[in-house]
Amino acid sequence: MINAATVSGRPRASVGGSGARLDFATLGRAPLQLTLGKRRITSRDLQIVEATDELLSEDVPEPEGVAQNVSLLRGFNATIPSAEKSRIRRRQTRNVDAPRLGLKKLGMSARGMLADDDGESVASEEDVVFVANGDGRGRKGKRRERQSLAASKTLGRDELVRQTQEIERDKENLHVRRALINSEISEITNKIEALDALRAKLEQDLLKLQEDELELNDELEGVKERLELEESRSRTRGDTSHAPHSSRRRKGPAFLPSEHDELPPGSHTTPITALDISEPYGTLVSASQEDSQPRVWDLLTGDELGRLRGHRGTVKCVQVEEHLCLTGSEDSTVRLWDLRKVDEDEEWEREMLRPGDVAEDDGEGRPKTNGVRAGSSKPASVAAPDGPCIRVLEGHTKAVSALYFEDACLVTGASDKTMRQWDLNTGQCVMTMDILWAISHPPATAPGSAMPNHLFPGAAAAVGSFSVPMPPYADGTWDMYQDFVGAVQFWGYALVSGSGDGAVRMWDMRTGQPHRTLLGHTGPVACLQFDELHVVSGSLDKSIRIWDLRTGGILDTLKYDHAVTALQFDTRKIVAATGENGVKIFNRTSMQHSTLLTNGHMKPVGRLRYMDRYLVSGARDSTVKIWAL
């Protein structure tokens, strides 16, 4: 049972009629604040009292203003509730005694709200009051208009001076409070910044752990593939097949080099046009622009093992798998090499380069495409009797610009705007895929492919002799780009090609028909690679596009300042040659870009081969460099 009572002229509440009188709001709203006095005495208050002498001698480091040279004790006094007493006193001084309390005060009392701590009733200027008439009795039920309580109050000079000093002191109190709040805000801001820095560091550590996990997964996959390869070899002992299992899809070796090195200077004298490696510390084959003889290197020692003699034009594409190497040249031929024989006698070259091997005209200004040379009964696959060249594959009528082989299957792309599928065991061309036919007959199910003019404007030149100017390199030089088929890669029966019309096409190697065209590039596609989920393509339009194989849409686009001429990727990185002296690296986990420049090339990089953390790059400065990422 709660009964109303009046204590010190204010409404109070007593509990159960006991002698202890407690404020209703204190009991109902803040039970934890019950104290013997008006405010709780804390240990901090005791510390301040004990250090009073020291505090009085200290100054608050405040800027120029009303609170200059204020002691710490003065600053403390500005923050306690008693600092408001002067403001309350001034309000009381300006007020007049009213016959009845204002409506606002009555409403507060009726709700049992707390009054002022000093127990005095204070009426503000905003209160609405009833003013008595001349005989001291108010007219019943009639409300007079609102009047200010201080309208007729007269204050003396001493009181006004005192109020002026109090107001100045209150302004100082406000300044001190503002400074304390700003200080706390600054401290909180510093803590937030420190926590943000700690969070960023932890996120980087988390990304590093994620990269380490991906690396372990890739290493495990590579080891399993090698184990399967060894088991398959043990089951097929005695097989004389010349084509080992391709390692192009492997993620990389279990060991990594720890040095950055380059091949002996002066090895090549013209820009590097093609290169590939078998594995770290394995065999490297590199070719340059005006040299028809690719060079074979031992990466373990850095020595040149020999040269592959036989091509009559610049070698534009190379693939090395263990001891086998395939090269495609401007002389429209593809050669299969046994790298174990490069240091043997090369008398076979005179046998291979007999005069009179000139292609016969088919009556329309083009050589015959039946794979038979004029005046010769040799088939499309010419077997060399001796030397490192095992086979010569003939069939294309223009420069072979791209090739990819795995097991006994080879796919080549050439400037004659066709791709050919070969059987390396027999050397026969199994199928020819015509890109011009694919351009004129786009797949009906391919999104957006109903209109061939979706391709970039320069694609119209594909019908004739294809040649487009490349965007300038970083050093200001430029070339004419004539490789209509920029890149090919297959996996099983799925073949992906990038061509000069700016399209990335997906083919079914069982039928030789394209079933999807990925449109988005506005320049010739010069390089690409794909895995189970994505196709990554680089173009002369200065961009790399990441495609989703499931939807055919573009997941991401990386833009650069110059043409993209070579790239490779794995689960963690995309490594690319983008017309600059440095090799560009895009971290797919952290989405960060970086560049390999230290002790790097002096001219733009054009070709590269990347295996996990092992990179070989070739540039227009005629050098080949080996990197340990």
Image: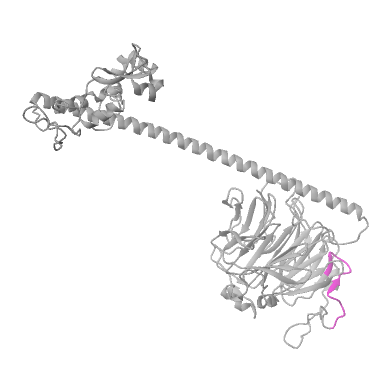
Q: Which residues are magenta?
A: 375-391
Q: Position of residue 189 (x, y in %)?
A: 42, 36
Relative to 534, is 179 above or below?
A: above
Give 234 or 11, whichever is nearer the viewer: 11
Residue at the extreme front of the image, as rendered: 140
Give 312 or 627, whichever is nearer the viewer: 627
Name the residue: 80% across, 56% down: 322
Residue at the extreme bottom of the image, as rendered: 363
Looking at the rendered structure, the number of numbered marks drawn on it comes to: 0
Q: Position of residue 408 (x, y in %)?
A: 83, 63
In the picture, residue 48 is in which quadrant?
top left
- Magenta segment's dominant SS is loop
Relative to 493, is 185 above or below?
A: above
Q: Position of residue 459 (x, y in %)?
A: 60, 75
In the picture, residue 426 is in which quadrant?
bottom right
User: Which image quarter is the N terminus in?
Assistant: top left
Residue 407 colored in magenta in the image: no
Residue at the extreme top of the image, as rendered: 19
Give 147 or 86, whichever is nearer the viewer: 147
Give 130 or 351, whichever is nearer the viewer: 130
Name the residue: 87% across, 80% down: 377
Name the residue: 20% across, 34% down: 126
| Residue 271 showing in the rendered view | no
| Residue 217 showing in the rendered view | yes
Q: How is the image coloured?
A: one colour
Q: Position of residue 427 (x, y in %)?
A: 84, 70
In the picture, residue 483 is in which quadrant?
bottom right
Relative to 472, is 340 above or below?
A: above
